[in-house]
Image: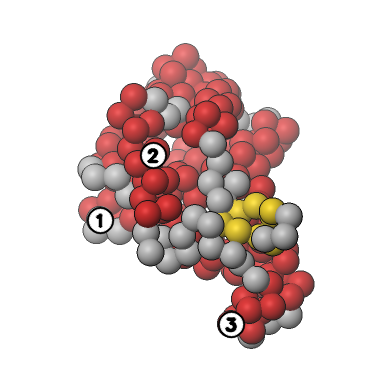
Amino acid sequence: MNHAQRLRLVIEDEIVQGRLPLGARLDEVQLAERFGVSRTPIREALIQLASTGLVETKPRRGTIVSAPEPGHLIAMFETMAELEAACGRFAARRLIEEDERDLRAALDGCARAAENEDTEAYYQENYVFHTVIYRASRNAFLCEQARTLHRRLSPFRRLQLRARHRLGQSLAEHAAVVEAILAGDAALAGDTLRAHVVVQGDRFTDLVASLRAMGDAA
């Protein structure tokens, strides 16, 4: 992980946790002085954040903390759900011994993080879990597209995990996905992954509430 990526994660954390509220201006010079780096990695980090919709550049205001419109965000989650469903279907049909081992290990990692109620650790293990499924699809192009959109949605997936009881629900959904893939049931694997990722109903309202909390936090 390079300097820009590490800085992106730090700034992303501060936005998600409300320490940088919506509308806050992100000055490159001040951030460079604060982190003891040149402006180049700061600029690169802000560009990465802009791709997720967490920041945007406005005329005469510079780069500010932002958030994507709920409709656009939901559209991204819908697309992600379909990509994940495709990965799950292919993985169920093409699973090899190495993938099975990695999938079981990834599920165990999620279980440990959930047991400790460690949201950030679970987020990291969740990323591993999903990337194992992408790789198991044995479709390099699909894997690349899924990884790209996963990264764009990463801050909002982290927000979701902070909803009450979400870790336990997510873990149960992971277990169902693994069961379907190991059984070679492509249709069930796809349907289970789609339902796991898509944001609708209560999960939609929870996510919107979290986004509002970002704006209300001081």
Residue 10 at x, y percent in the picture: 52, 67
CB atoms at circles 3 and 2 under 8 Å apart?
no
Disc 1, SS: loop
Circle nearer the viewer, 3 or 1: 3
Q: Which mark is residue 34?
A: 3
From the image, tell me which residue sits under label 2.
207
Camera sees residue 154: no
* Quadrant in the picture for residue 3: bottom right
Q: Earlier in the sequence, mark 3 or mark 2?
A: 3
Circle nearer the viewer, 1 or 2: 2
Mark 3: amino acid: Arg
Residue 159 at x, y percent in the picture: 40, 48
What is the quadrant of the C terminus in the image?
bottom left
Work out how far the residue at label 3 is from the one at label 1, CA to CA, in angstroms: 32 Å
Residue 10, placed above or below residue 68: below
Mark 1: amino acid: Glu
Which residue is farthest right? Answer: 40
How busy is the neighbourhood of tag 2: few (under 14 within 10 Å), some, or many (20 plus)? many
Residue 57, placed above or below residue 3: above
